[in-house]
Image (spheres, rainbow, N blue to C red):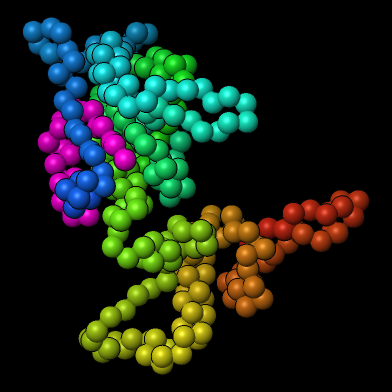
Amino acid sequence: MRIDVVTIFPDYLAALDLSLVGKARRAGLLDLRVHDLREWTTDRHRTVDDTPFGGGAGMVMRPDVWGRALDDLMLETSAPTVPAAGDDVARGAHLVVPTPAGEVFTQRRAEELATEEHLVLACGRYEGIDARVAEHYRSAGHRVSELSIGDYVLNGGEVAALVMVEAVGRLLPGVVGNPHSLVEESHGAAGLLEYPVYTKPPRWEDREVPEVLLSGHHARIERWRRDQALERTAARRPDMVAALDPELLDRHDREVLAGLGWQVVGGAADGPDGRRSSARLERVAE
Ligand code: ADE
């Protein structure tokens, strides 16, 4: 995979030389290039921003500078093709714009982006990038995703770009040594947070590792971990419990969730007029 990151602070991205992403770059699994947006300015002051039309605080990044940078980078791989009807193979670079005004960047988004051959990340500063830039590349047939890493405001897109490159990079084949470690993680397909983990020593500060984990009894360990994942998710992320598909819950799961105040409702002929409503989890009133 190729990833280009465009920023006015290339040094921010130096952390991508480290750890697994750095190793993936050196191994040739990830062709990651960081660019200084000011290379595409044409004036003596290397200006990238200007005042907002309509007034208001702050500065907005100019579309002409971004356009020159992105025209150069986005077309270095194949040109975009607007997929024909029935053909969902999109080609060409996918433009990613980190912004607090974007859709939420989730593990599902990371998985989608990991299937692309070329990502270009455009890091905005100040009040953001002139809105015509995203529109222009979308109408030229590129996929364009404006994505937020969470409900808080950073000073620019660089830290969000670091987050995205790491989340996507570790999903590329060969980057994480043991692919099994990708299977049971929080935000995986099960829709649950990961269970707590323990290592040696078995006793530390008067605290024992849960006995079941020392039992060697594989099925009991699996069940205990699943119960812990359900408990954790109910306590920390009730939104994730509400989004669980009841079809994926066995009887024991349902009992554990009932003990935590969650019940499966619907899914039988109990809708209005006796029609089938889809099953979902609901919190039982206390
Ligand atoms: N830029 C500033 N804040 C951001 C956020 N929360 N997510 C992505 N990009 C940002």
Q: Is 8 part of what is drawn in magenta?
A: yes
Q: Is residue 226 shown above or below 77?
A: below
Residue at image coords 29%, 37%: 2
**In this rendering, is residue 202 above or below 258?**
below
**Residue bounds of the magenta highlight:** 1-22
The C terminus, quarter of image: bottom right
Q: Is residue 163 visible?
A: no
Q: Is residue 18 left or right of residue 123?
A: left
Q: Position of residue 260 (x, y in %)?
A: 58, 72
Q: Residue at x 86, y 59 (%)?
A: 269
Extreme-right residue of the structure: 273
Q: Residue 16: give x, y in percent of width and height.
A: 19, 45
Q: In the figure, residue 236 lies in which quadrant? A: bottom left
The single residue placed furthest to the left in the displayed view is: 44
Location of residue 148 by image quarter: top left
Left or right, 272 with respect to 66, comes to right
- 3 in the magenta segment: yes
| Residue 33 seen in the figure | yes
The residue at the point 34 percent across, 33 percent down is: 118
Q: Which of these two is toward me, 224 or 52?
A: 224
Does residue 168 lie above or below 46 as drawn? below
Q: Please tell me in which quadrant of the rendered image residue 71 appears.
A: top left
Q: Is residue 265 above or below residue 31?
A: below
In the rendering, at what x and y percent does residue 39 appear?
14, 18
